Image (cartoon, helix red, strand yellow):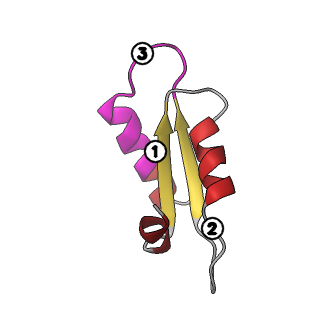
Amino acid sequence: MQEFVDSVDDCIVVEMNASAQFKNELERNIETRRRPHDIELHPLTRYDGNPVRPNQVEQKITKVIQNE
């Protein structure tokens, strides 16, 4: 996982949990601070029992790209 994180500037973490447990676990177990910038972990959480839909992932990607 560290190798992947080191290769990107932003990472969207998709999970079925309201408290973003997986994102928090990633933050505790990987080195997210790099020079000259930091990686951003962006949570996409869904906790109503329904699956994450492709359009929701697309919307999140668009927001991340537009720096929202």
SS for callout 2: loop
Q: Are marks 3 and 2 in contact (CB under 8 Å)?
A: no
Gap between marks 3 and 2, in whole Å?
Answer: 30 Å
Left or right of 41, for residue 56: left
Q: Mark 3: which amino acid?
A: Asn
Looking at the image, tell me whether mark 1 or mark 3 is earlier in sequence order: 3
Give the residues in magenta. 46-61
Tell me: residue 68, above or below residue 19: below
Labelled disc at residue 32: 2
Of badges 1 and 3, nearer the viewer stands 3
Residue at the farthest bottom position: 36
Q: Amino acid at mark 1?
A: Lys
Mark 1–mark 3 distance (CA, rounded to whole Å): 17 Å
Q: Residues within 10 Å of mark 3 (few under 14, many from 20)?
A: few
Q: SS at mark 1?
A: helix
Q: Which residue is mark 3?
A: 50
Tag of residue 60: 1
Q: Can residue 68 be seen?
A: no
**At which x and y percent is residue 65?**
45, 60
Q: Decide: marks 2, 1 in contact (CB < 8 A)?
A: no
Residue 18 drawn at (x, y percent): 63, 26
- Residue 37 screen position, x and y as percent: 63, 79
| Residue 29 in the figure: left or right of residue 1 | right
Residue at 56% of width from left, 43% of height from top?
Answer: 43
Q: Earlier in the sequence, mark 3 or mark 2?
A: 2
User: Marks 2 and 1, how far apart in space?
Assistant: 20 Å
Identified by mark 2, the residue type is Thr
60 and 66: which is toward the camera: 60
- Position above or below: 21 against 31: above
Residue drawn at 40 percent across, 34 percent down: 56
On the question of residue 13 being in view, the answer is yes
Which circle, 3 or 2, is nearer the viewer? 2
